Amino acid sequence: MEGVPKVKLKEIRRRTILYGVTLLVTILCLFPIIYAVFASFKPNREMFTYPPTLFPKKWTFEAYVYILSQKQYLKHFLNTWIVAGSSTVICVVLSSLAGYGFSRFNIPGKRTILVSILAMQMFPGTVLMIPYFRLTDMLKLYDTYIILVIINCAFVLPLAIWLLKGFFDSIPIEIEESAMIDGCSHARAILNITVPLSRAGVIAIAIMTFLKTWNEFLFAFILTKGPAKAPISVGLASLFTTYNVKLNAVMAITVLSILPLIFIFVFLQRYIISGITGGAIK
Amino acid sequence: MSILIIGGFEGSMFSKGRSYRGFIFIGPALVFLLLIIIYPLLTIFPQSFQEFRNQTFRFVGLVQYKRLLSDELFWLSIRLTIIFTVGTVVLHQVFGWALALLLNARWPNIQLRNVFRAALLLPWIFSAPASALLWRLLYYSRGMLSYISQQLLGFRISFLSDPNWALPAVLVVFTWNFYPLYMLLILGGLQAIPRSMYEAAKVDGANRVQSFWKITLPQMSGILMTMILIDFITTFVQFALVWVMTKGGPLRSTYLVSFYLYEKGLLTSKFGYASALSVIIALIIFVFMFINLRYFRGGSS
């Protein structure tokens, strides 16, 4: 009789420790973000108070108003949307086709091609810095959207193909075949049956491409010049060493730059997680 | 009737024999990858034997490799890159494991656990420049961490302008930016281990520490090696975050090999010399990639 509450007590203690430790760790990990968000609502002179404070004494939107009145940052955002949006569309189309092809057809040399694509997925872009710079220059594509879209696509494509191949593999061929028995053409069978069934995989790819392209820095940095075509990552980087700017505005634009991703993250998180775990363990 | 049609005509589409029709589907992506990744990659090999001067390439053989290997700056950058990479891999594993084990504990409420998992993933969606700016606020002379260091140690650490502190400082930010990826991968691996194995071990009288060493680690060894190798490859050529924060300084205390590549190739236009360096980096990466594909992935895919 006495044993039951004792076990219960032990369980309650275990839960309290588990919740407590996790909460503490989470706050520590998120502290840089929390601190920056509060800082973006401070008036600029409060940024230099010492000792530093977490909460603003006076809440204000002046940092956001200031940064949104600066045309160049709006241009950076527009550029990012254009590059990330186009890369996502192109990557989804190419990887869906290729994923379907690898899944459904017994292509000669399939295994070799797939392993090479896997190797490309692991291959880091930094090594290609020199050829990209030279080729961009030779093709007169310096400071254009096109080159950024092409390169971003190329680096997401291998992972996307592998993920979608796995996804199509999990959809039985028989479903398509039975649709064709019922009089569908192959194209219609793909459009009406396979495409809707593979929606989750395609969304995961779209999100991965968008996130990666939105955050890409190296190639945007070496292949663009000024706010005409450069995405927001380059705009943010240029703020790092400028010491005379308003620090609260810097935090405001950092927060703004991450908002679309937070939005995706909150509403579409399960796709991201399946994308990461699926892609790496394959 | 229709089955006969499938068997005779449409069925060949998915037949077991070789089919070139699949190239219609994979063709566009293959051409794209060949043009945008393979071709540029191949150009660095011939260029590494040529010197770029007065807008033209001239064949010089292995001279640039010799020059590179006797350049002190190259060796400095390699040494710093190895320190940075090893530090990163270790820290990612330490934090990844700690957090994954925490999330993999018996949670009475799975919803709550998922909320924490989502919150802990958050740093990963910050781009390198955004992460750098967040941490700048903590690191700068009137920032929170400078204040804390003054309270604890009695002096203010100037994290990014002190050559002794710059490398650890950027290492912390890099770890912060990417630990979520490793946490998630380890968590995925942990959840794939059947519970029954732990229960069987418990019946046999094993405690938690024993079942961690005897069950968890052996079960995770494949994922673990893959993670470490991929982390090594990506960190070895990391550019964005450290570049934004320090540009290799102060006094070249954070001068990574990718900065050396950038300086030689893009700032001083020594394309041939930089190509030789690219080849060396690519070879190092190929070795790690080969180990990964050969020993840890080949069978499973």
Image (cartoon, helix red, strand yellow):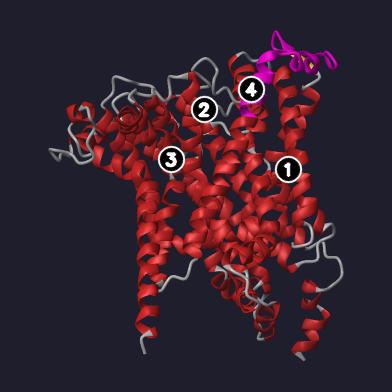
- Closer to the camera: disc 4 or disc 2? 2
Question: Magenta segment: does it hold B80?
Answer: yes
Q: Chain of mark 3?
A: A
Which of the two discs, 2 and 1, labels the residue nearer the N terminus?
Answer: 1
Q: Is residue B36 left or right of residue A64?
A: right
Q: Mark 2 highlights which residue?
A: B167
Residue displayed at 60% across by 19% down: B266
Residue displayed at 79% across by 28% down: B45
Are labels 2 and 1 on one chain? yes
Q: Chain of mark 1?
A: B
State which region is magenta: B52-81
Q: Chain of mark 2?
A: B
Q: Please state the horizontal and vertical placement of residue B291, each as a whole percent of the image.
A: 78, 46
Dot 2 and dot 1 residues touching (CB under 8 Å): no
Residues under labels 1 and 4: Cα distance?
A: 31 Å
Using the image, determine if residue B204 lies above or below residue A92: below
Using the image, determine if residue A154 lies above or below residue B70: below
Which of the two discs, 4 and 2, labels the residue nearer the N terminus?
Answer: 4
